[in-house]
Amino acid sequence: MNRNETNKDSSTRTRRGIIDLLKQQGAMDVMALSSEFSLSGMAIRQHLNALQDEGLVTYEEEARPMGRPAKLWRLTPAANRFFPSGYSELSVSLIDSMREAFGNTGLDKLLAVRNKNMQEQYQQQLGSLSSVRGKLEKLADIRTNEGYMAEVQDQDDGSHLLIEKHCPICEAAAACKGLCANELKLFRSILGDHVLIEREEHILSGGRHCVYRVMEAEQVQDTKMPV
């Protein structure tokens, strides 16, 4: 492999790394990206400009106390092609066909059957786990394997956040709101009646991630979390 090919491969890896990091962390400035990749600001800007030319990233300016506004770089919707998509099982066209054949009521029944099957699969994978934290960690692993890029974050008030940074069925969910509603029901059934879970951020509603706050019922009286 000659030097030009080596440099090209290195640039490709770095740019894909930038895409992955922006997906995980959200908007970042050049300084933060430079630190992550141990590259100069000039090198990072070159990669960002190349990604911008491809329509994969864009930026917005953020005022800083001193100096010029900083550019915060983020992914565009076009970058979703780099991440897993699960449209094959629940494609928009299939949803439309099911709605036409069975009506909205029939479609809801089909989604309920799917939800029940998923609940059984998840319960089997959770095994004998009993703690909320343990269940959430395993649930995040399951969802990550399905393409949701999920993680758990512990909060100071004792609650936990289940964060999904990607939605592999986003187009299907946009066409069928029942998918998201059933997803919340699925999580509630998996975690148990003694656990409260509320969606705080939603990709389809313009959120950067889907975020669920999880808390044991006995903790709710000391918080503002709605029952």
Image: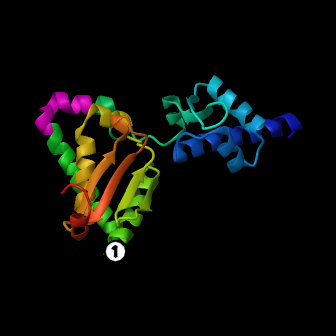
Provide residue 162's location: percent of width, then percent of height.
38, 56
Provide residue 224's location: percent of width, then percent of height.
25, 57
Q: Which colour scheme is used?
A: rainbow
Residue 21, relative to residue 5: is it above or below? Answer: below
Residue situated furthest right in the rendering: 2
Question: Which residue is found at the position 36% from the left and 33% from the top?
Answer: 171
Q: Is residue 18 left or right of residue 145?
A: right
Question: On the image, numbered disc 1 is attached to which residue?
Answer: 129
Q: Is residue 136 left or right of residue 64?
A: left
Query: What amino acid does circle 1 point to?
Result: Leu
Q: Does the magenta stretch include residue 16?
A: no
Residue 4, relative to residue 164: is it above or below? Answer: above
| Image-quadrant location for residue 73 | top right
* Magenta residues, start to end: 95-106
Provide residue 210's location: percent of width, then percent of height.
37, 46
- Classified by dominant secondary structure, the portion drawn in magenta counts as helix
Q: Does the magenta stretch include residue 98?
A: yes
Question: Which residue is found at the position 23% from the left and 45% from the top?
Answer: 181
